[in-house]
Amino acid sequence: MIIAVDGPTASGKGTIAKALAEHYGLPFLDTGLLYRAVGFQLLQNGGDPDSPDDALEACEYSDDILEHPELRDEAIGGLASRVSVHPEVRAALNKRQVDFAYQPGGALLDGRDIGTVIAPDADVKLFITASANVRAERRYREMKSRGVNVEFEAILADIQARDIRDAGRTTAPLKPAVDAIEIDTSNMSVETAIQSAVTAVDSKV
Ligand code: C5P
């Protein structure tokens, strides 16, 4: 069984994806981490995220980078969103994701284009959304709880900018696959969101 979980930043897709992988005993790949690794490597190289050549060079990161806690930083997320616009970068990261998706025994991947590009014939495709305001509130609370000093308005602006970049790019834009089941988590608790995802998967298999 292949499960594709796509959606915008802070929609709850990562939490849902992890819970589903555990529930169904599937190996899990957070593909955002691969783009974040490229952003991180680009920073180390002193490259320009808007240059396709610099971004492509940063795709040759060593896998140790994937263990760095800094990959989760907002700044790296922003860089990931900028390097992921380049078709060259998407092509360079494609094989690893496709191989993971089509391994024997199945897999679960979360990202932006899993259901549309990486695994278009996935058994189940979920598209997780929530309003920009709710997503900004979640990110704000999460950062505050880690002691990071942030302004709500700045987070909301960043989330909106990322949405526009992710959905507006020409190659593999963020959008639900035609056969995706959409789950809007705006008014759901984490438990309810996970439960509705399980129900959605069970309805398909
Ligand atoms: O999911 P996460 O926030 O870690 O992803 C960081 C950025 O990487 C996203 O904003 C998006 O631009 C990019 N990304 C992508 N395709 C994926 C996963 C992430 O373009 N499959």
Image: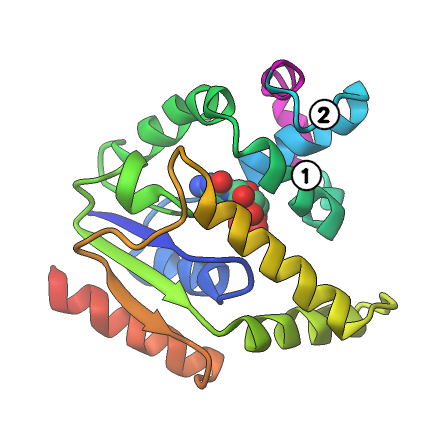
Asked if residue 137 lies in the magenta stretch, the reply is: no
For the residue pair 53 and 7, the one nearer the viewer reads as 53
- Circle 1 residue: 79
Whether residue 41 is visible here, answered yes or no, is: yes
Quarter of the rendering occupied by the C terminus: bottom left
| Residue 178: x %, y % from top left | 19, 53
Q: Nearer the viewer, residue 200 or 165?
A: 165
Residue in view at x 58 percent, y 17 percent: 56
Residue in the image at 39% along x and 82% along y: 192
Q: Is residue 163 above or below residue 109?
A: below
Tag 1 near tag 2, CB within 8 Å? yes
Q: Position of residue 64 (x, y in %)?
A: 67, 27
Local secondary structure at mark 1: helix
Magenta stretch in the rendered image: 53-67
Q: Is residue 10 above or below residue 119?
A: below
Find residue 147 and name its label: none
82 relative position to 155: left or right:
left
Residue type at tag 2? Leu
Q: Is residue 50 above or below residue 20?
A: above
Secondary structure beneath dot 2 equals helix
x%, y% of residue 198? 27, 70
Residue at mark 2: 42
Residue 49 percent across, percent down from the top left: 68, 28
Q: Is residue 66 magenta?
A: yes
Task: Locate residue 111 relative to residue 57 in the image: left or right.
Answer: left
C-alpha span from label 1 to label 2: 9 Å
Q: Please name the amino acid that badge 1 sits on.
A: Leu
